[in-house]
Amino acid sequence: MNRVPLEGKVLSENARVAAELRERFREHRLPVLNIISSPGSGKTTLLEKTLESFSPSERVAVLTGDLQTENDANRLKRYGFPVKQITTGGTCHLDARMIEKHIADWDLEKLDLLIIENVGNLVCPSSYDLGEAAKIVLLSVTEGEDKPLKYPSIFFKSELMVLTKTDLLPYVPFDVPAAIENARRVHAEMEVVKVSCLTGNGMHEWLTWLERRKHAFLAELAHLVG
Ligand SMILES: Nc1nc2c(ncn2[C@@H]2O[C@H](COP(=O)(O)OP(=O)(O)O)[C@@H](O)[C@H]2O)c(=O)[nH]1
Ligand SMILES: [Mg+2]
């Protein structure tokens, strides 16, 4: 079987749909963030804490991807914001068509932020553009500081690395400066935030980053238009 041309076709079709989505998100002045990590790094927990911190008037929505179950959407729905689960069946990443389908009945004009929790995987999601403004990679302190070197693509493409579960640092031999250095060897401009969702340490820095990124997206748009 000739796998490579088929894979190329799938990726170029995805790129086409993602470009249309990006255009739509720009028309609606909607910053979209694509959160990627291995399973269990703390994506849903970080989103729970994030939604919990928002005032009810915040115009945010979340799409969350997994192979199976509605568990994450059920966890996230408790905060009162629009949330949808995308179950991929067996696919190890979200693609642009899935995003298009799941936002079809949302009025994007009523949103100021859309956060996508990708399927837990450090490899496949990095190849599939979802029309997002930025990718964010999470790395928990139990995963080893060498992961940016082993899975460089996603670290290269992400603007921000969130080091999660920092409350566990006293118990695991994880070298934080080495992890940051490894990430910056792959992506020199990588921004880094260290967070513990258990203690709340670093949440302020994460929320500040989010706010700053939303403004940067709008400023970029104004620049494109003007
Ligand atoms: N100690 C600790 N555990 C965490 C933290 N964040 C998440 N967890 C735990 O890590 C596990 C996986 O978290 P989850 O958010 O479901 O990860 P996801 O698969 O990336 O969405 C759960 O048992 C969480 O309670 C944290 O900051 N500190
Ligand atoms: Mg999750």
Image (tube, rainbow, N blue to C red):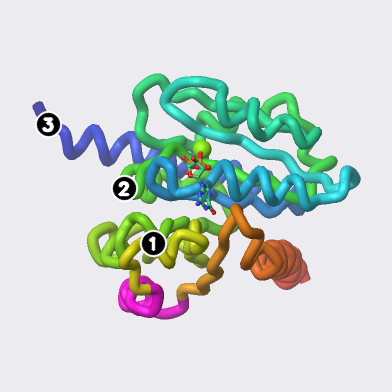
What element does badge 2 sit on?
loop
Q: Earlier in the sequence, mark 3 or mark 1?
A: 3
What element does badge 3 sit on?
loop
The quarter of the picture where the C terminus appears is bottom right
The quarter of the picture where the N terminus appears is top left
Marks 3 & 1, CB-CB < 8 Å contact: no
Mark 1 vs mark 2, CA separation in Å: 28 Å
Mark 2 vs mark 3, CA separation in Å: 22 Å
Image height of 51 relative to 96, above or below = below
Find disc 1 in the rendering and name its residue. Answer: 171
Residue furthest left in the image: 1
Of badges 2 and 3, the one in the foreground is 2
Q: Which residues are magenta?
A: 176-189
Horizontal arrangement in the rendering, residue 204 relative to residue 39 (left or right): right
Mark 3 vs mark 1, CA separation in Å: 48 Å
Q: Amino acid at mark 3?
A: Asn
Horizontal arrangement in the rendering, residue 205 relative to residue 125 (left or right): right
Name the quadrant containing residue 78: top right
Magenta stretch encompasses residue 187: yes
Residue furthest front in the image: 171
